[in-house]
Amino acid sequence: MSNSKENEKGNTPEGSNKSIDNLIENITGLIDTYIEMGQLELKNALAYTITYVILISVLVFFLLFVFFFTSVGIAVWINNLSGIAYLGYFIMALFYFSLLILFFSQRKNIKAKIDIAISERTKNK
């Protein structure tokens, strides 16, 4: 009779082995669940990043068209005002060249400001 009570309580080596096996299965299941959650979070972050990059790329593409056609329009307008067929294009080229020189001379300051903005944005998340 005492032998059947020991089996019911799990005090036998067979009962403790089953408990250990159950514990190991639960732990491995928990680890698998955490891994799957991490993979899902990574997939979500990747999908968000890809979507963001595509959106920014499309916006930049259309913005470049706006700048291009605006520049051509201003150049043609300057041509009409001056009466010289090519002066507007040279003036617009000079304008963009001066912007290039300005940005190139200030590249360290611009990079520092961008780095600060990125670090602040990543801290908030």
Image (cartoon, rainbow, N blue to C red):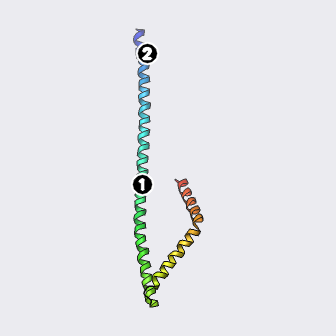
Residue that extends furthest to the top in the rendered view of this protein: 1
Using residue 49 as the reference point, say whether residue 125 is left or right of it. Answer: right
| Residue labelled with disc 1 | 48
Disc 2 target residue: 13
* 79 is higher (above) or lower (below) than 50: below
Amino acid type of the residue that numbered disc 2 sits on in the rendered structure: Pro
Give the quadrant of residue 84: bottom left
Where's residue 37, x and y in %? 42, 42
**65 above or below 55?**
below
Give whichever of discs 2 and 1 has the lower sequence position.
2
- Where 88 falls versus 116 (above or below)? below
Q: Nearer the viewer, residue 83 or 120?
A: 83
Relative to 94, is 122 above or below? above
Percent coordinates x, y for residue 51 in the rendering: 40, 57
Residue 15 x, y percent position in the rendering: 41, 18
Instruction: Tell me whether circle 2 and circle 1 mark residues in contact (CB < 8 Å).
Output: no
The residue drawn where x is 56% and y is 56% is: 119
Q: Tell which residue pokes out farthest to the bottom in this image.
A: 83
For residue 69, what is the image quadrant?
A: bottom left
- Quadrant position of residue 98: bottom right
> Looking at the image, which residue is at 59% across and 68% down?
106
Give me the C-alpha separation between circle 2 and circle 1.
52 Å
**Which numbered dot is residue 116?**
none
Q: Secondary structure at mark 2?
A: helix
10 Å neighbourhood of mark 2: few (<14), some, or many (≥20)?
few
- Quadrant of the image for the N terminus? top left
Q: Secondary structure at mark 1?
A: helix
What's under tag 1, amino acid-wise? Tyr
Q: Position of residue 42 (x, y in %)?
A: 43, 47
**Quick one: 16 or 46, which is closer to the camera?**
46
